[in-house]
């Protein structure tokens, strides 16, 4: 059994790995990276040196191609706040997957500078082949400093109270000043007002995602992926003061040799001034390496992943080390992955030779044009003022001796041929990258001479190459970044966190997430032809609506309800494809609970229209019977009254009978109106024959009711006619 490694042995291994990785980087990667940067910025004198006294123009094909590709690819990943979607392993993980999706995207976009990370990594990928992203959990406490002025003693006591975790804020500065203020009763009272500067712990740790420059990343020369690499390293230039602030021993930090002058190809290309000397020793720059190396430190025969912090290079100092329990924090975002190797090809690799050729052709075209616009001249004889030939002026005069003449030395104009060659080279670039006049929609000839379908096919062919780049970055890079972030949150976040997402409070607790859930990156919509995407989604929506209608016509209500979430999803994708951020805010959310509730409502029995009509008829008959009974009772009361008040009573009875008749007519009208409304409502719920039957029943009932009403009114009139009429008032007296 092997023995445990000592710090000295581990330091030697780390120093050796650093030197090997640096040597491999210098020989295989540093020069291509610096060359790509030079071509991007147009610094090409050492690659295509210009001729003396000739055009020095530089074609910018690398920058132009990246400039056209970058917006489309950025649109893929930033069109929605849901760049990553967690996929449940089973049905039981559906709720946790939705929660994980919200949590992952919030941490990436809000807690970290998500847009800047995506932009930097994508830019590095297009230019150098591999964008580098570092994902890790930083357990260093984060503090927030705040200022408070004019606080009373009670307010200050409340401010300095411990938080929910028992942490008390640290008072950095405090001043108090007595103030004379009027009291409630008008008397002047003395109040102490306090000014405070406090520091309070914001949180214990945070999940960090950052894009680092490719030149700051070292990897084992035999590695084909970062996760399985034997050695990875993030090296930076830091001051001694920064290292001390990070918690390293001051004596060890001061023993680190000063970094040499950084004149690497990358720093020169980026135009960075890395002066390592300083008047203050604490501000001297030193090399700082955060290494992740696989080595057997405990002697069990198995290599562990070790995080070793190293200052300097081959003659440096091991500052600290620990067995790393998390995953390797580095992931690469490849542009054009090459199977079985780590280095990917870049857009610069595909276009640098194009830029060389176009630079030469463009210079020759301009030189030829300059020559034809201002040709050389031959003088036969003698010129009295030769300066006028060398530096001609508009309207100037050349004085010649007798018999002398001036002849232009003509040079053939080759501008059209040079332009044809440049056009051909542009077509080669389009074939390699998908970026050309057709994909830019800048070629009027193509738009005029081709059909819409042919033009669309040309654009789609170009877009497919862009889609492939975005898909490579998503599947080979961003997917691993978000999976790593999810596992870090499951492992390190041991509390419930409340997030504000789209105006709603969402609670996340990664402790209950399934670590085996996969991650999908939203790719496809937002790139390519939006017209194509919208057209295809429109066809899908039409087919969904037609299918839902057929389900309803066949009586399959549950199947029709099941189509609602799918229809909403399609409409959301259409809005997303049109470039609308957060399209889910515009449509209702159909959860499983809402769908089940709709199915339950649809399953409830509906009222029978015929039964409703029978009930209405019964109500009419009862109302008529009640009115008849009331009239009979009042007639009997009139007959039982004394002769003294008989005439008056009979008169009142007549009035009451008439009023009762009016009430009955109103009641009949109200009931008939209610029956009519019920008939209309029933007619809307039934179809075909049922509807016609309901109408016939309702019409017959109305005729019957009217007949009954007419008969009743006739009977009432007959009763009134049979009664004795009162004597005239004078005869009665």
Image (cartoon, rainbow, N blue to C red):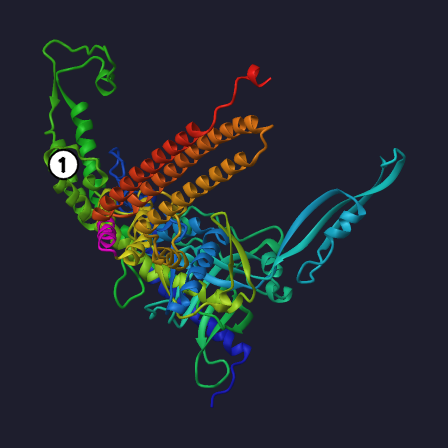
- Please tell me whether mark 1 sits on a helix, a strand or a loop: helix
In the image, 694 versus 238, the foreground residue is 694
Look at the picture and state if 283 lies above or below 363: below
Q: Which residues are magenta?
A: 544-555
Q: Position of residue 731 (x, y in %)?
A: 55, 16
Name the chief secondary structure element in magenta.
Answer: helix
Q: Residue furthest right?
A: 187
Total numbered circles: 1
- Residue 327 lies in the magenta stretch: no
In the image, 110 versus 639, the foreground residue is 639
Q: Position of residue 238 (x, y in %)?
A: 54, 57
Is residue 19 something one can see in this rendering? Answer: no
Look at the picture and state if 555 lies above or below 58: below
Crowding at mark 1 (Cα within 10 Å: few <14, some 14-19, many 20+): some
Look at the picture and state if 324 lies above or below 408: below
Task: List the residue tagged with mark 1.
Answer: 446
Q: Position of residue 322 (x, y in %)?
A: 53, 73
In the image, 435 versus 618, the foreground residue is 618
- Residue 551 lies in the magenta stretch: yes
* Residue at image coords 49%, 53%: 112
Is residue 296 something one can see in this rendering? Answer: yes
Q: Is residue 155 left or right of residue 565?
A: right
In the image, 575 versus 107, the foreground residue is 575
Q: Position of residue 374 (x, y in %)?
A: 19, 23
Q: Which part of the image, by quadrant, shows the C terminus?
A: top right
* Residue at image coords 46%, 42%: 629
* Residue at image coords 18%, 23%: 373
């Amino acid at each position: 059994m092997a023995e445990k490694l000592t710090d000295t042995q581990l330091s030697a291994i780390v120093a050796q790995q650093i030197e090997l990785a640096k040597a491999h980087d210098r020989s295989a990667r540093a020069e291509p990276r610096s060359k790509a940067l030079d071509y991007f910025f147009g610094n090409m004198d050492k690659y295509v040196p210009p001729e003396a006294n000739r055009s020095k123009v530089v074609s910018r094909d690398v920058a132009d191609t990246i400039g056209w590709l970058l917006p489309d690819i950025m649109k893929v990943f930033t069109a929605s706040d849901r760049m990553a979607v967690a996929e449940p392993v089973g049905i039981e993980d559906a709720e946790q997957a939705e929660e994980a999706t919200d949590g992952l995207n919030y941490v990436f976009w809000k807690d970290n500078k998500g847009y800047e990370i995506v932009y930097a990594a994508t830019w590095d990928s297009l230019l150098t082949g591999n964008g580098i992203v570092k994902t890790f959990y930083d357990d260093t406490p984060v503090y927030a400093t705040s200022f408070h002025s004019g606080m009373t003693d009670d307010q200050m006591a409340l401010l300095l109270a411990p938080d929910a975790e028992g942490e008390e804020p640290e008072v950095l500065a405090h001043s108090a000043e007595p103030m004379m203020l009027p009291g409630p009763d008008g008397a002047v009272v003395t109040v102490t007002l306090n000014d405070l500067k406090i520091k309070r712990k914001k949180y214990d740790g945070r999940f960090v995602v950052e894009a680092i420059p490719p030149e700051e990343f070292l990897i084992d020369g035999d590695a084909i992926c970062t996760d399985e690499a034997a050695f990875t390293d993030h090296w930076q230039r830091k001051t001694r003061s920064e290292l001390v602030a990070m918690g390293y021993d001051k004596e060890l930090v001061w023993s680190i040799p000063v970094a040499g002058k950084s004149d690497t190809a990358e720093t020169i290309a980026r135009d960075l001034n890395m002066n390592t000397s300083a008047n203050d020793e604490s501000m001297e720059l030193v090399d700082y390496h955060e290494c992740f190396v696989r080595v057997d430190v405990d002697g069990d025969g198995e290599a562990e992943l070790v995080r070793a912090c190293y200052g300097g290079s081959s003659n440096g100092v091991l500052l600290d080390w620990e067995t790393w329990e998390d995953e390797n924090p580095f992931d690469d975002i490849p542009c054009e992955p090459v199977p079985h190797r780590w280095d990917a090809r870049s857009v610069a690799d595909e276009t640098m030779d194009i830029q060389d050729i176009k630079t030469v052709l463009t210079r020759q075209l301009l030189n030829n044009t300059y020559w034809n616009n201002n040709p050389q001249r031959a003088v036969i004889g003698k010129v009295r003022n030769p300066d006028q030939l060398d530096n001609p002026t508009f309207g100037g005069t050349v004085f010649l001796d007798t018999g002398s003449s001036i002849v232009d030395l003509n040079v053939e104009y080759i501008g059209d041929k040079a332009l044809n060659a440049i056009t051909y080279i542009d077509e080669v670039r389009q074939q390699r990258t998908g970026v050309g006049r057709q994909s830019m929609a800048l070629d009027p000839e193509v738009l005029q001479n081709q059909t819409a379908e042919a033009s669309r096919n040309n654009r789609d062919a170009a877009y497919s190459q862009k889609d492939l780049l975005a898909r490579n970055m998503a599947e080979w890079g961003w997917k691993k970044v978000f999976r790593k972030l999810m596992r870090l949150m499951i492992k390190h976040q041991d509390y419930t966190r409340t997030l504000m997402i789209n105006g709603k409070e969402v609670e996340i607790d990664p402790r209950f997430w399934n670590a085996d859930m996969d991650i999908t990156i939203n790719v496809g919509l937002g790139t390519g032809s939006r017209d194509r995407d919208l057209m295809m989604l429109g066809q899908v929506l039409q087919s969904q609506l037609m299918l839902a209608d057929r389900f309803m016509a066949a009586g399959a209500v549950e199947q029709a309800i099941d189509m609602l979430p799918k229809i909403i999803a399609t409409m959301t994708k259409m809005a997303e494809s049109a470039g609308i951020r957060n399209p889910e805010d515009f449509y209702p959310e159909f959860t499983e609970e809402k769908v089940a509730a709709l199915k339950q409502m649809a399953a409830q029995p509906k009222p029978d229209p015929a039964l409703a009509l029978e009930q209405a008829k019964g109500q009419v008959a009862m109302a008529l019977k009640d009115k008849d009974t009331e009239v009979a009772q009042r007639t009997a009361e009139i007959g039982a009254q004394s002769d003294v008040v008989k005439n008056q009573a009979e008169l009142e009875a007549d009035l009451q009978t008439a009023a009762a008749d009016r009430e009955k007519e109103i009641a009949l009208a109200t009931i008939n109106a209610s029956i009519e409304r019920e008939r209309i409502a029933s007619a809307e719920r039934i179809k075909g024959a049922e509807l016609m039957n309901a109408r016939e029943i309702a019409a017959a009932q109305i005729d019957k009711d009217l007949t009954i009403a007419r008969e009743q009114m006739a009977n009432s009139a007959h009763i009134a006619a049979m009664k004795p009429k009162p004597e005239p008032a004078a005869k009665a007296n």
